[in-house]
Amino acid sequence: MSLLRALRDKKNTLSKTFRRRRAPAADSEIGSAVRVETEETDGYLHHGWTRRVIGYVAILMMVNVMVDSVLASPTFVLPQLGEAFHTNQFAWIGSSAMLAGAMWAPLLGKSADINGKRKILVITLLVAGAGGLVCLIAPNIAVFVFGRLLQGAAVAATFLTVALIRDICAPKFAMVVTGFVTSGSAVFGIITPFILEPALHAFGWRIVFVISAVFACLAALLVRLVIPESRKTAPGTVDVKGALVLGLGLAGVLVYISLGQVFGWLSPISLVVLVAGAVALTYWYRVLSLKPRPIVDVRGISAALGLGLLVVIMGTGAYQSMLQLFSILIEVSPGEGLGYGIAAPAALGLLFGIPSLGIMLGGVVAGAISARVGPVWSLGAGVLLGLLATFIMLVAGAGSLPLAVLSSFMLSMTAGSMVTSGFNLASVLAPPERQGTVSSLVMVMIAMGSVTMNFIGSAVLGATRITHNGESVNSSLGVHSYIAVAGVVFALAIIPTFFLVRRMRGHVTVSAPVSHL
């Protein structure tokens, strides 16, 4: 009996030891269990820079250069587009692709998790290329906007490149690589105006969409031939109906916010769009999100992820609104006596060209910080840097080109840091098979922040306009109030950042359980 008792005690001891070794670390925020990536489970992942990894990064950076071209290049030809389509409704041209990106994101994110991220990225790029061709041959503004909606699929390409990096690289190294992939394309923003200008003179506005379509198809080919397919996918099917209802609901609300000031907030078309969007979102939340495996499990979003998304929407929105303000300031000379203005021969290049390096610097540094101490710290650093930049603008930057350039550079670093940190935070809080879905939420937050804060800024300027020399112009009060609003948003973003840091302290390369987003 003593021998049997000894064997039984030995068995119990071994069982307890085995359970302790396998027990996941407790995390009150992410859920119950967490999974730390080990050498056994990620042996096929890359842990450092090799020629193969550099090739992957170069191709995925090329994808994001194409995304930048879809979003930014048409702004260089707005006057020509207005003349070609006999319209002055430039808001559709500027915002349609970003709005469509918010609509596309949930569908493409979920599809990528189920069917493979590389496959969906290739399809996304081909859809964006087709959109460029539609814009190229569009006979009227309606067809042109349809083409821009197709091009908006390219916005989803950004979060798919990040999700692929998670499949290719080990967790810590993936955070560093994400900084290069998401922000490295900004370097091309320096040379883009110099390349486009002679091309526009030679071929007209259509060359922008020729370049975009060719770029998209070339990127699709390289991704298909070189980038490996996802090794981890989620079971199930895509709720297409849920994706369409959610996407249309998001698009309806964002279109109202973005274009209500153009058509009138109480105009029939604005109200119809708002009500349709609100009804779609309500129906999705009350009915479709309750189905098994919904397109986005909003009820399964942890508080940590919710706080992170809140910081992203506030921080990136404030940055985008300041970017819009710089476009206004360079049109006004300090000599006009309005109390603001930084017009100068080199203002455009100094404010939008050189600061592009700040985006890359911010993204790369944020990736390195994320790998060492966690993405919440680099996310918080981005918020504080943005707050300091807006303070400089508020004190004297609105009337000083050197200070405006400094502020623009700091804000660019903020943008690079927050985007990279947002995606890295998503990678921490989601298992590999859910990276597409969670990363798509980050992209939706970026789009919502951009549209909402641009609207708020425009409303502030519109409410404070004055008459100067017989013309209606923006007042000094309006400009400085605009900057103050962005600064307040950055300051408010510190609050959720503080709670996020407390909840996520100590978690760097930990993945969340499958049951949580």
Image (spheres, rainbow, N blue to C red):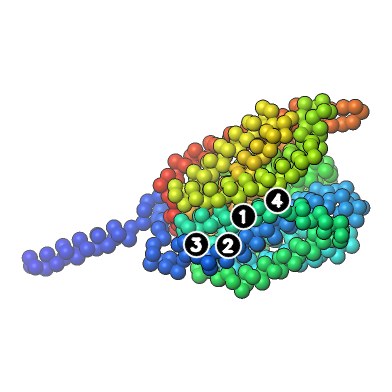
Please, what is the three-letter code of the amino acid marked with disc 1? Gly
| Pointer 3 residue | 49
Q: Nearer the viewer, residue 271 or 9?
A: 9
Residues tagged 2 and 1 counted as in contact (Cβ below 8 A):
yes
Numbered label attached to residue 190: 4
Name the quadrant containing residue 206. bottom right
Numbered label attached to residue 57: 2
Numbered label attached to residue 414: none
For the residues labelled 3 and 4, the Cα–Cα distance comes to 26 Å
Q: Secondary structure at mark 4?
A: helix
In this rendering, would 355 be left or right of 299? right
* Image spot of residue 97 (x, y percent): 74, 55
Please, what is the three-letter code of the amino acid marked with disc 2? Val
Name above or below for residue 231 compared with residue 360.
below
Q: Nearer the viewer, mark 2 or mark 4?
A: 4
For the residues labelled 3 and 1, the Cα–Cα distance comes to 16 Å
Residue drawn at x 20%, y 61% is: 13
Numbered label attached to residue 184: 1
Residues tagged 2 and 3 counted as in contact (Cβ below 8 A):
no
For the residues labelled 2 and 3, the Cα–Cα distance comes to 10 Å
| Residue 464 visible from this viewpoint | no
User: What is the count of numbered marks?
Assistant: 4
**Mark 4 or mark 3, which is nearer the start of the sequence?**
3
* Image spot of residue 264 (x, y percent): 83, 41
Residues tagged 1 and 4 counted as in contact (Cβ below 8 A):
no
Please, what is the three-letter code of the amino acid marked with disc 4? Ile
